[in-house]
Image: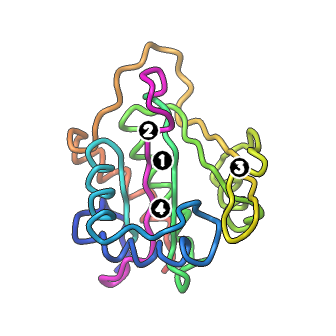
Amino acid sequence: MVEIRLAGPADAPACREIYAPFVRDSAITFETELPGEAAFAERLSETLEQHPWLVCEHDGRVLGYAYASPHRSRGAYKWAVESSVYVAENARRCGVAGGLYQSLFAVLERQGYRNVYAGITVPNPPSTALHDAMGFDRVGTYEDVGYKHGEWHDVEWWARSLRDDDEPPSAPIPIPELDSDAVASALATGTNALSL
C-alpha cells in the first residue's frame, strides 16, 4: 500500500537517510554537513509547528518527503513559503515527487498560503522539469551564490501561486490547528496520483 501522510517523529531517521546523499554527493542542497539525528528530528518537529512535512510511504518504507518552510522572516511574508522535496534514489521517476508536491500544495492552500517558491541549484534537469510540470514559473537566478565541492553554483528561483484572491488575508492556519478532514482531503490528492 502507498500513501502520502503527515510526518511524525518516527519518520526522522528515514528522511535523514534519504537526505544524506544530497548533502554528501551533490550541490542540490547547500548544506555541507549532514545534521545529526537529534538535530534532524528537531528540524522536522519545528517545521510541523506551522508548516506541513509530508512523507510518501510504500509498504512501511519512506520513499520520499516534502515540506514547506517560511520564505522570509518578516511579517508581510507570512503568506509565502519555500518548498523542498527529496526522493530516495531507487524511488525516482515513479511519481513520488509529483505526488508529494500535489499533496503539499493542497495542504498549503487549505492553510491559507498564497505563493510557493523553490530554489534549484542548476543544472538539475529532473528538478527543473518537475517544477515546470507542477506549475512553477522561473522568476530569476542568483549567479555564483553558493560554493560547494570546489566550484560556484547558480540557484534558479521558481514561483507558483496557490490562490489569486485579493481579499485581505487571514493568518495562515498552523498545521496542528487545521481541520483533520481538510488535511485528509489534501493528502489524498497526491496519494491518488501515485502509480506504485
Quadrant (top left, top right, bottom left, bottom right) of the N terminus: bottom left
Residue under circle 2? 109
Q: Crowdedness of circle 4 by 10 Å Cα count: few (<14), some, many (20+)?
A: many
Query: What x and y, as percent, mark residue 104?
Result: 44, 52
- Residue type beneath disc 1: Phe
- Left or right of 167? Residue 127 is right
Sort mark 3 into few (<14), some (14-19) or many (20+) by Cα contacts within 10 Å. few
Which region of the structure is painted magenta? Answer: 58-77
Q: Whole-percent x and y of residue 194? A: 49, 71
Label of residue 145 in the image: 3
Mark 4 — residue? 100
Give the side of residue 83 with respect to residue 14, left or right: right
Q: How was this image coloured?
A: rainbow
Q: CA distance from mark 2 to mark 4?
A: 14 Å
Check disc 2 and give the amino acid type. Answer: Glu
Image point 39% across, 46% down: which residue?
Answer: 107
Q: Going from the N terminus, do you reach mark 2 or mark 4 first?
A: 4
Kindly identify which numbered label has been placed on residue 23: none
Q: Secondary structure at mark 3?
A: strand
Q: Which residue is mark 1?
A: 105
Check if mark 3's residue and mark 1's residue have beta carbons within 8 Å.
no
Instruction: State the image quarter where residue 117 is shown.
Output: top right
Instruction: Identify the amino acid type marked 3.
Output: Val
The Cα–Cα distance between marks 4 and 1, rounded to whole angstroms, is 9 Å
Residue 82 image offset from top left, x and y in percent: 52, 44
Is there a contact, CB below 8 Å, between mark 2 and mark 1? yes
- Residue at 38 percent across and 71 percent down: it is 15
Q: Is residue 61 magenta?
A: yes
Q: Sequence order check: which comes first, mark 4 or mark 1?
A: 4
Element marked by disc 4: helix
Comes first in the chain, label 4 or label 3: 4
- Quarter of the image where one finds residue 124: bottom right
